[in-house]
Image: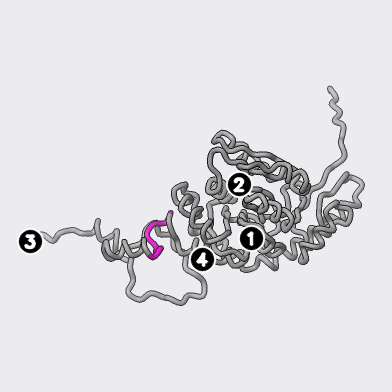
């Protein structure tokens, strides 16, 4: 009798399971698999019930490990990790808002955050941009349908900051939620949730990862909010890739050391540029002449961040025909 050739089947499964599993590695292994094997339908049912691992878009060990680290650093109850900072922002806003709602946002936000908020108008969500540091202006902007105030701890690219405790008190007075983008500060310099913010978003691509080799974002908040955001995230597909999560977790182990050094370097550079005749103005909250420097001294005990911007004098361009 001719022996049946099972190679085509065997090549799919041989080596996919091992009898002895190393359960105590010093570094979490990288789980690139898109799906996890189950013993039977009962096992599958239990994994869904116990929030176990079944499919990459719903849960992944590397993503869960990173979310646990982010939650600790941001002093929250829970977090989700997203495929980019913008994915984190969009998932957050779409979780909170529905047609007919109103958002108040700082007018000096990251440009693409402003673009996203503008896009929400086509879905029936109105947005008012204000000077978030002017509490009187913010107060006048609240409406009965205002559900959220959106701002950044250090704005991109104007390098302004805010008194989170005061804006949180005002926001909660109007039964709204305060969303803070903490990308430029990171949890090392400031913890918005401990100062009254409800939700913190981060682009982990920047200072958190620190190695310029991943694109990731995170959202941190209460268990109740993160459950809603997670359910929507799974449907939107904004979950992060395992390799990116693994790399970022590695990078964040040295985040505090890096951010401190970057803040020191930025302050030194800001002082140098401030005295340079070819520079018109330097935007950095660590400089004594910045209008928010006293506030910055109060809320940033470890430094003022690694980002600055500056303006150059206007230059006339002369064109000559030869």
Q: Which residue is disc 2 drawn over?
A: 147
Query: First in sequence: mark 2 or mark 1?
Result: 2
Q: Dot 3: what SS?
A: loop
C-beta proximity under 8 Å, tags 4 and 2: no
Q: Is residue 178 above or below residue 249?
A: above
Query: Which residue is labeled 4 in the image?
Result: 65
Q: Residue 224 or 20: which is nearer the viewer?
A: 224
* Mark pair 4, 2: CA separation: 31 Å
Can you tell which mark lies on residue 1? Answer: 3
- Separation of marks 2 and 1 at Cα, in angstroms: 29 Å
**Magenta part of the chain:** 50-57
Gap in angstroms between the C-alphas marked 4 and 3: 53 Å
List the residue tagged with mark 1. Answer: 208
Q: Earlier in the sequence, mark 2 or mark 3?
A: 3
Cα distance in 3D space between marks 2 and 3: 74 Å
Measured as percent of width and height from the top left, residue 96 is found at: 55, 48
Residue drawn where x is 87% and y is 31% of the image: 316
Answer whether labels 1 and 3 touch (C-beta < 8 Å).
no
- The numbered disc on residue 78 is none
Q: Quadrant of residue 306?
A: bottom right
Is residue 83 a member of the stretch shown in magenta?
A: no
């Amino acid at each position: 009798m001719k022996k049946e050739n099972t190679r085509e089947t065997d090549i799919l499964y041989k080596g996919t399971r091992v009898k002895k599993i190393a359960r105590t590695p010093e570094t979490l292994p990288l789980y690139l698999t898109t799906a996890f094997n189950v013993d039977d339908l009962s096992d599958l049912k239990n994994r869904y019930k116990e929030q176990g691992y079944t499919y990459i878009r719903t849960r992944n060990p590397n993503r869960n490990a990173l979310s646990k680290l982010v939650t600790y650093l941001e002093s929250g109850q829970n977090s989700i990790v997203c495929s980019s900072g913008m994915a984190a922002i969009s998932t957050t806003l779409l979780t909170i808002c529905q047609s007919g709602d109103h958002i108040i946002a700082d007018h000096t936000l990251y440009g693409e955050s402003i673009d996203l908020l503008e896009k929400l108008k086509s879905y029936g969500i109105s947005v008012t941009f204000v000077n978030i540091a002017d509490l009187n202006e913010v107060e006048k902007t609240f409406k009965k349908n205002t559900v959220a105030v959106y701002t950044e701890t250090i704005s991109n690219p104007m390098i302004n900051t805010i008194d989170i405790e005061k804006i949180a008190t005002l926001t909660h007075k109007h039964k709204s939620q305060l969303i803070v983008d903490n990308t430029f500060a990171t949890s090392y310099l400031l913890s918005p949730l401990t100062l009254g913010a409800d939700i913190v978003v981060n682009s982990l691509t920047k200072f958190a990862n620190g190695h310029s080799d991943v694109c990731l974002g995170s959202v941190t908040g209460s268990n109740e909010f993160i459950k809603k955001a997670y359910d929507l995230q799974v449907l939107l597909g904004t979950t992060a890739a395992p390799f990116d999560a693994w790399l970022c977790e590695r990078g964040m182990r040295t985040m505090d050391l890096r951010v401190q050094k970057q803040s020191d370097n930025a302050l030194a550079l800001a002082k140098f540029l401030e005295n340079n005749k070819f520079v018109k103005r330097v935007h950095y909250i660590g400089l004594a002449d910045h209008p928010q420097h006293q506030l910055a001294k109060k809320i940033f005990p470890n430094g003022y961040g690694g980002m600055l911007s500056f303006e150059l004098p206007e230059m006339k361009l002369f064109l000559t025909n030869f």
